[in-house]
């Protein structure tokens, strides 16, 4: 008869699990999951946040045995049936290959046993989330040392993000859920720092397996929205070769209009008039955020154009005025910042060209 210890995923199994991004069940509480998660895991707690707090207090006051008894009492009857049912459903419909808690201890052991009683045997990860995170942080350290990077730079709107997706790359903006600019917020909330680091490490771990070809990353500042790049990784980026993508102002305006106006409207769950008002409010607030660098007069002028263009869009379905404020932001805000940055980093530039030329250079 097997014991809990018999069905534990080994370190080698964990490495393979991470590389293949197989689905996992995270039985930690919601608050633990929110502070740091593995992207391809689903949070189906055995103890929710309130229950975990109660069990933790019991542990501190009366010890482990009393805490386990309280936990089993809190999660019994219909509550227990619902939690087991959620695990069973996920395993049968998605195919989870392992489960874990914080350190691979009692919570994952008990969840594993309950599933076994329902005819499902699934391993738990030895060491739990803590072991997974340590493995990912180790891969980050190895990437700093071993993985060659090339940084793709260029002015706002030249199409850097679209280009790197055709190459061997890590999409930092996708992982950070932010486009890396004052106007770059996305509808999806940004991850916590630990979750961002986990996903970055996983992407680098996968890319670094058996291949030493350069990895392409987009030129980013230390902060991508509210998320900070790990110091060692940012330092490596800052010392890596720069490849500069160039494009015309007209193409850049078209691209920014699509990404910052058309795409958000298409993705919005609101009706178009409400979506336009909501987007306008966001961009007016963003102009206020960069008012100090723009200067009060220019910021006020741009806000008037933003307001007018969205009203014209809503009332007449005329989008032409959007090009005016987009061009002004590119000319007055984004381009001066970029020109200053690239001047300081000119010694790192190894190539300049349009999309076709840069792609051919980077694909070699």
Image (spheres, helix red, strand yellow):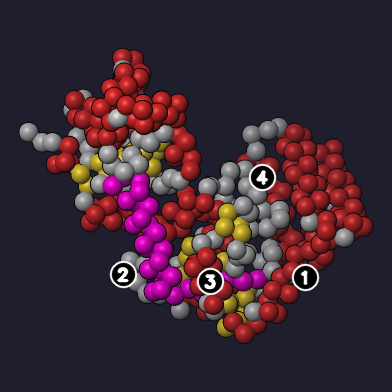
User: Which mark is in front, 1 or 3?
Assistant: 3
CA–CA distance between discs 2 and 1? 41 Å
Magenta segment, which residues?
127-154
Marks 1 & 3, CB-CB < 8 Å contact? no
Q: Is residue 313 left or right of residue 236?
A: right
The local secondary structure at tag 2 comes to loop
User: Which mark is in front, 3 or 2?
Assistant: 3
Marks 2 & 1, CB-CB < 8 Å contact? no
Which is the main secondary structure of the residues drawn in magenta?
helix
Q: Which mark is residue 336?
A: 1
- The image quadrant where one finds the N terminus is top left
The local secondary structure at tag 3 comes to helix
The location of residue 232, given as percent across then percent down, is 49, 68
For label 1, count other residues whose C-alpha is less than 10 Å away and answer few (under 14), some (14-19) or many (20+).
few
Tell me if residue 207 can be seen: no
User: Which mark is in front, 4 or 1?
Assistant: 1
Residue at the spot 45% in from the left edge and 46% down from the top edge: 36
Which residue position is annotated with label 2? 210
The local secondary structure at tag 1 comes to helix
Q: Nearer the viewer, residue 23 or 261?
A: 23
Which residue position is annotated with label 4? 264
User: Which mark is in front, 3 or 4?
Assistant: 3
């Amino acid at each position: 008869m097997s014991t809990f210890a018999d069905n534990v995923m080994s370190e080698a199994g964990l490495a393979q699990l991470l590389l293949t991004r197989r689905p996992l069940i995270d039985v930690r509480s919601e608050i633990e999951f929110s502070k740091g998660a593995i992207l391809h895991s689903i949070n189906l707690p055995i103890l929710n946040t309130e229950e975990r707090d109660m069990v933790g207090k019991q542990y501190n006051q009366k010890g482990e045995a009393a805490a386990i008894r309280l936990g089993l009492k809190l999660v019994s009857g219909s509550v227990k049936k619902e939690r087991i049912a959620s695990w069973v459903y996920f395993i049968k419909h998605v195919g989870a290959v392992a489960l874990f808690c914080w350190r691979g201890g009692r919570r994952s052991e008990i969840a594993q046993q309950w599933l076994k009683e329902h005819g499902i045997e699934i391993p738990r990860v030895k060491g739990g989330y803590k072991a997974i995170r340590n493995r990912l942080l180790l891969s980050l350290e190895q990437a700093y040392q071993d993985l060659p990077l090339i940084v793709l730079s260029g002015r706002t709107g030249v199409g850097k993000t679209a280009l790197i997706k055709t190459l061997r790359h890590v999409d930092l903006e996708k992982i950070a859920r932010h486009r890396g600019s004052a106007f770059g917020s996305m509808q999806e909330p940004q991850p916590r720092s630990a979750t961002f680091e986990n996903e970055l490490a996983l992407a680098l771990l996968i890319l670094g397996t058996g291949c030493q070809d350069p990895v392409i990353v987009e030129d980013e500042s230390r902060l991508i929205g509210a998320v900070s790049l790990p110091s060692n990784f940012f330092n490596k980026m800052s010392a890596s070769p720069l490849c500069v993508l160039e494009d015309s102002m007209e193409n850049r305006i078209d691209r920014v209009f699509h990404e910052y106006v058309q795409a958000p409207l298409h993705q919005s769950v609101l009706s178009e008039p409400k979506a336009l008002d909501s987007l306008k409010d966001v961009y007016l607030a963003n102009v206020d955020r960069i008012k100090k660098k723009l200067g009060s007069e220019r910021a006020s002028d741009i806000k008037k154009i933003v307001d007018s263009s969205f009203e014209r869009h809503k009332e007449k379905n005329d989008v032409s005025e959007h090009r005016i404020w987009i061009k002004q932001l590119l000319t007055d805000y984004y381009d001066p910042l970029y020109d200053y940055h690239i001047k300081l980093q000119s010694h790192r530039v190894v190539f300049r060209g349009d999309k076709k030329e840069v792609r051919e250079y980077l694909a070699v």
